[in-house]
Amino acid sequence: MTSPSAAPEILAFGEAMTMFVAEASGKLADVEYFQRRIAGADTNVAIGLARLGFHVGWLSRVGDDGFGTFIRQALEVEGLDCRHLRTDPEHPTGLVFKELALGGADPHVEYYRRGSAASHLAPADADSVDFSALRHLHATGIPPALSSSARELAETMLDRARDAGASLSFDPNLRPSLWNSEAEMRDTLNALAVRTDWVLPGLAEGRLLTGRNSPEAIADYYLERGAQAVIIKLGPEGSYYRGSRGGEQVDFTMPGVPVAEVVDTVGAGDGFAVGVISALLDGLSPHEALKRGNLIGALAVQVRGDMEGLPDRIRLDQLTSQLK
């Protein structure tokens, strides 16, 4: 077991928000009772990797308020190393309210994150990170959308992790409403993506970011610019991989895992990322990595909540053996 004092081997960064999920269906204006949880694509992946036994660090800011305390405590319960989670006394923790969707529909979500503590992330927040101990850095397109200083932090994190020899993954996680323009979003995120090893867009995201239509063409866009592998989420159809392994080009589609009932689609892509990243860090082949990604993504859509379906290592091994 990793010593608590040891620097994290995996690091993620971004914004964790306190989320209030409606207990009854209907418009938020009509809902009286909510359940309190955590929201954030970056934290979903961090929690998923921690549940699988990796020593994962979380870098962010929360407000000096009850919501920030709740987030810190909840992340620590999940096993995350929060030494790089800063309490900001001048800015509040971001909040999000989520409707209870029925029948697998995408739920309506309302954010209250403008001016949040995490939007004031800056390159100085990386000063205390021991990059020499880092094995892997996971990044998404959300921090660069929060503010110019958070964008500079993302660039700093990627550059310092790469210089230290860590592997890097990048999930665009597009949030168009946070950007000034689609062109700015596209140019900024593509510039970040090509600095990483594994790029994990959804098919619609890849089309918007690259202007190319097919999974093969989208993958080539990033491979031609320096990425080692591109893994594209295809929804229920599964996923697509294109990249190099052992000096050879690998190219294949992995069918999705059938699901009897879709309860909540939010977090499915994050579950997929957990599966792929963990498998590659475990030394498994791209085929096995996409199988695991599809499996955990399927688990995520069968429960209500963003990260409640993410398995621990024992459950993952049990489910994997059942699929063989």
Image (spheres, rainbow, N blue to C red):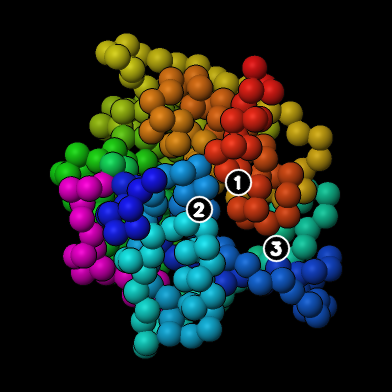
Q: Could you tell me how far apart the alpha carbons at marks 3 and 1 are, in whole angstroms? A: 22 Å
Q: Secondary structure at mark 1?
A: loop
Quick check: 179 above or below 200? below
First in residue order: circle 1 vs circle 2: 2
Q: Secondary structure at mark 3?
A: loop
The disc at residue 310 is: 1
Look at discs 3 and 1 and give the one toward the viewer: 1
Name the residue: 47% across, 49% down: 50
- Name the residue beneath numbered marker 2: 47
Quick check: 65 above or below 114? below
The disc at residue 252 is: none
Name the residue: 70% across, 44% down: 301
Q: Could you tell me how far apart the alpha carbons at marks 1 and 2 are, in whole angstroms? A: 8 Å
Are the residues at dot 1 and dot 2 in contact (C-beta closer than 8 Å)?
Answer: yes
Q: Which residues are magenta?
A: 116-134
Q: Could you tell me how far apart the alpha carbons at marks 2 and 3 are, in whole angstroms? A: 24 Å
In this view, the residue in front, 183 or 221, is 221
First in residue order: circle 3 vs circle 1: 3
- Name the residue beneath numbered marker 3: 108
* Quadrant of the frame with the C terminus: top right
In this view, the residue in front, 99 or 73, is 73
First in residue order: circle 2 vs circle 3: 2
Name the residue: 63% across, 37% down: 315
The crowd level at tag 1 (other Cα within 10 Å; few <14, some 14-19, many 20+) is many
In this view, the residue in front, 45 or 323, is 323
